[in-house]
Image (cartoon, rainbow, N blue to C red):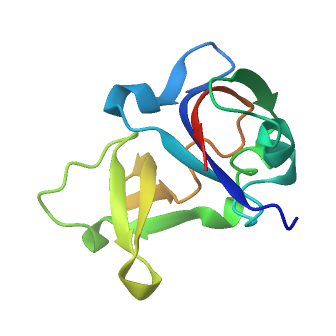
Amino acid sequence: MSDQRSILCHMNIVLEDGSTADSTKASGKPARLNIGDDTLSPAFEAQIAHLAEGDKHSFTLEAADAFGESNPDAIHHMDRSKFPADMSLEPGVIVSFGGPGGSEIPGIVRELAGDSVTVDLNHPLAGRTVTFELEVVQVL
């Protein structure tokens, strides 16, 4: 797509049970969605390509078109000794790992069994059907 543009919008990400997983309104900073640069799935782009300033649009995407399917290869079983001794490890705790180029990769502790810690490096919303509620602030 040669038509590259950006949309600044406030966005709520709503789970199937109706709870809000994330909202830009809490921070007061709208999200910037770039159309045509391959950062968004084609299904997501199709939903927002026609939006104009002031538009409100709500749509639901299956996991594959939202944050991807959960990848079993991104679930790792690690020895407790790999973590700082004073770190509180329990299911739901988010831990950070060093990634390529100094980036940080967040992981969620899923399970503890003896000295084994199961860490999930998938996006927290991977494998979930989610609804996006957008309110366009500006089209750039």
Image location of residue 127, percent across then percent down: 72, 42
Q: Is residue 48 left or right of residue 118?
A: right
Q: Is residue 115 visible?
A: no
Which residue is at a point 33% across and 33% down the rendered structure image?
27
Give percent across and percent down for residue 29.
38, 38
Q: Is residue 2 left or right of residue 67?
A: right
Q: Is residue 58 above or below residue 105?
A: above
**In the image, is residue 123 above or below residue 8?**
below
Is residue 21 toward the left or the right of residue 43 in the image? Answer: left
Q: Quadrant of residue 13?
A: top right
Please determine whether, in this image, residue 92 is positioned above or below residue 69: above
Above-or-below relation of 98 to 17: below
Question: Which of 34/2 is in front?
Answer: 2
Q: How many marks?
A: 0
- Residue 118 percent location from the top left of the image: 48, 56
Residue furthest to the bottom in view is 101
Q: Quadrant of residue 56?
A: top right
Left or right placement of residue 15 versus residue 10 in this view:
right
51, 40: nearer the viewer: 51
Q: Which quadrant of the structure image shows residue 66? A: top right
Q: Identify the residue at image location x=69%, y=62%.
A: 39
In the image as oriented, which residue stretches furthest toward the left? 86
Residue 135 % position (x, y): 60, 25
Question: Which part of the image, by quadrant, shows the N terminus?
Answer: bottom right
Residue 83 visible here:
yes
